[in-house]
Each structure stands twice: as structure tokens, then as C-alpha cells.
Amino acid sequence: MKKINIAIDGPSAAGKSSIAKILAERLGYVHLDTGAMYRCTAYKALQKGIDLSDEAALVRMLQETKIDLTPSGNVFLDGKEVSHAIRADEVSMAASKVASLAGVRRELVARQQKMAEAGGFIMDGRDIGTVVLPEAELKIFMTATPHARALRRLRQNQEEAISESDLATVEKEIEERDYQDTHRKSSPLKKAEDAIVLDTSDLTIQETADAILNLAEPFLKEEHA
Ligand code: DC
């Protein structure tokens, strides 16, 4: 019985990670937050003072970098827990920069594809349906207006005491990252042709998770057939 893979792509703060986590729990699948891998790359580069546009240096750095994502959502970089540290605003902007480099993407995509070989993964990111898992049985493209996303990110920042930026600043940063992520040359954020678009602006987390579970049902039935 081979488990299916579910790809969830979309812009920042559309709710991908929260939803993927719920789905993974409900289905007994593993959630893989690929954004955390780009964030780890950026975090380590910032710490080491590596120029964020020096592709060769970043690739060399990655070849000696261990990134572990635990099923419960913790992130370990070279054995050290960085789950919280990689969510800082400075790291978000830097992650978007390093994610535009083809060499960095090649390194991380290869790791992601290897991890998902066994099936049973819910992977969220920007290029999962288009590049990482083009064969995924179910592909979701999750969107929400920049305003709705900024409100969510602000709430999350406050709950986790990550940053004290105001709504206007958070919204502006989200729009900047959207621009960077959709206009880069290497694997820009775009909907896979066969992905299903889900606008979550007016949906709760639970409603969104239920909508995806409904879409996944036919595939899950086949899995048990
Ligand atoms: O999902 P996130 O906000 O944690 O992602 C951090 C950055 O990494 C974001 O700017 C987009 C980039 N990213 C990417 O290019 N490809 C992925 N598969 C995941 C994230």
C-alpha cells in the first residue's frame, strides 16, 4: 500500500504550514515544511557573514550543512534547534533572497525529493507541485489576499513574540516577498497546471483543512483499495 503525496504551494502566510500540520496529523502523514530549509540556509549564511548573493559560497556551505525537520515540526540546523530563530523578519527576507539562486534550490530540492520517495508526505512550499513533486497525487495552490495574510502573520508574530512590526509593515513585507518569489528566474512561485486553487481569505483553518481532506478522499480510497 503506497501512500500518496500532497503538494501545497502558495505565497507567504497563506496558511500552508498550519494546514499541512493538521492534515499530517489527521492522515498519519509526515509534514515537510520546505520553507524552513531555505530559512535555515539564510540563517546560517547570516551567522557566517556569507554574502546572500554569492551562489557558489552558499552551495559550498550547504554541502556541509545538516538540516533536520522532525515530524512534530521542530527544525535542527547542524544539530542545534533553530525552530524559533529562523522565523525572525530578517531571516524571512534573507530566505527569499537565497531561494532565488538556482544552485541553492538544486541542493535543497534534491534533499526534498529523496525524503518524499516513500510517499506519505504533505510538502508545503513554492515549487512543490511544479518542480519537487510534479507527480504528487494532489496539488493545492493556496492563496489569500495580502491583507488577510498580513493579519494572520501579525497574530502569529504577537503570539510567538517574534517581532513587533505593525500591520502596515507586515503587509508591505509580504508584498515585497511575493514580488521576489514570483519574479525570480529560478522556479518562481506559480500554480502547477493541475493544481487546485484554494482561496483561504475567508476560510478558517479548520474549513481549509476539511476542504483539502475532501479533495484527498478519492486518492485515499484508492490507497486502501
Ligand atoms: O514558506 P516560508 O515563508 O517559510 O518560505 C521562506 C522563503 O523560502 C520564501 O521567501 C520562499 C522560499 N521558498 C521557496 O522558494 N521554495 C520553497 N519550496 C519554499 C520556500
Image (cartoon, rainbow, N blue to C red):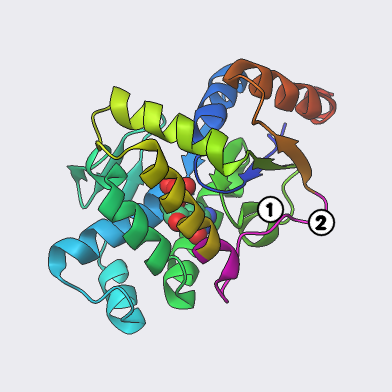
Q: Nearer the viewer, mark 2 or mark 1?
A: 2
Residue plotted at (30% across, 74% down): 58
Q: Quadrant of residue 223?
A: top right
Place of residue 5 in the rendered image (x, y in percent of width and height, measured from the top left): 67, 40
Depth order, front residue of 146/45:
146
Label 2 sits on residue: 193
Quarter in which the N terminus is drawn: top right
Residue 121 lies, with reference to residue 207, above or below; the image says below
Residue 144 at what x, y percent from top left?
63, 38
Residue 177: percent from left, percent from top:
47, 57
| Left or right: where 217 falls relative to 94 | right
Q: Is residue 110 left or right of residue 81?
A: right
Task: In the rendered view, tell whether residue 215 sits above or below residue 68.
Answer: above
| Classed neighbour count for the residue bearing mark 2: other residues with Cα under 10 Å, few (<14), some (14–19), many (≥20) | few
Question: Residue at left 56%, top 74%?
Answer: 186
Q: Secondary structure at mark 1?
A: helix
Snapshot quadrant of residue 20? top right
Q: Is mark 2 within 8 Å of ligand 1?
A: no
| Residue plotted at (61% across, 47% down) | 10
Which amino acid, mark 1? Gly
Give the camera-side residue of 137 and 20: 20
Dominant secondary structure, magenta: loop
Question: Which residue position is annotated with label 1?
Answer: 129
Q: Of the residues shown, which amino acid type is indicated by label 2?
A: Glu
Residue 180, numbered label: none
- The picture places residue 95, in percent across and down from the top left corner, at 37, 59
Residue 84 placement, left or right of 204: left
**In what element is the residue under mark 2?**
loop
Q: Which residues are magenta?
A: 180-194
Can residue 147 be seen in the rendering of this structure?
yes
> Which residue corresponds to the image point at 33% horizontal and 45% vertical from the top-left?
68
